[in-house]
Image (cartoon, rainbow, N blue to C red):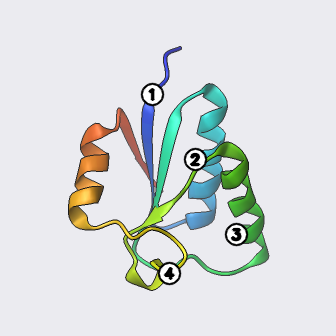
Amino acid sequence: MSEKKLLVLARRDHTEAMRVAAGLTICGHAVNLVFMDRPVEENAANAATAELLGVAGIEPQTTVAAMGDDLPLLDADGLARMVVNADAVISL
């Protein structure tokens, strides 16, 4: 299987989006993760799942200005470029 460039958009379920993104790297895919719509809840489940991102080598970005201090802030043009350059987009 050849490596694909995948984009995971974390919209409704941030925790599941983190799990999916990390899991997709097992198959050798290059995965980008973008948190959207609202800040990620600070809870134990999200903290544990966020550790998976580090292990998987995923550096998430966000479109939520309130999260811009912790994560790189992605503007509309940047998000559009990511969507166009992805082989597949997964929205969760």
Give residue 8's position: percent from left, percent from top: 46, 50
Residue found at x 51% / y 80% = 39
N-terminal-most mark, 3 or 2: 2
Q: Dot 1 surroundings within 10 Å: few (below 14), some, or many (20 or more)?
A: some
Read off the residue under disc 2.
Answer: 21
Read off the residue under disc 3.
Answer: 46
Circle 2: element type: helix
Give residue 84's position: percent from left, percent from top: 24, 42
The numbered dot on residue 4 is 1
Compared with residue 44, is residue 5 higher up or lower down, i.e. above or below?
above
N-terminal-most mark, 2 or 1: 1
Read off the residue under disc 4.
Answer: 69
Residue found at x 62% / y 80% = 41
Q: Nearer the viewer, mark 4 or mark 3?
A: 4
Amino acid type for the residue under numbered disc 2: Ala
Q: Are marks 4 and 3 in contact (CB under 8 Å)?
A: no
N-terminal-most mark, 3 or 1: 1
Q: CA distance from mark 3 to mark 1?
A: 26 Å
N-terminal-most mark, 4 or 3: 3
Q: Dot 3 surroundings within 10 Å: few (below 14), some, or many (20 or more)?
A: some
Amino acid type for the residue under numbered disc 1: Lys
In the foreground, 11 or 57: 57
Q: Dot 4 surroundings within 10 Å: few (below 14), some, or many (20 or more)?
A: few
Amino acid type for the residue under numbered disc 4: Asp
Q: CA distance from mark 4 to mark 2?
A: 22 Å
Quarter of the image for residue 65 reads: bottom left
Give residue 88's position: percent from left, percent from top: 37, 36
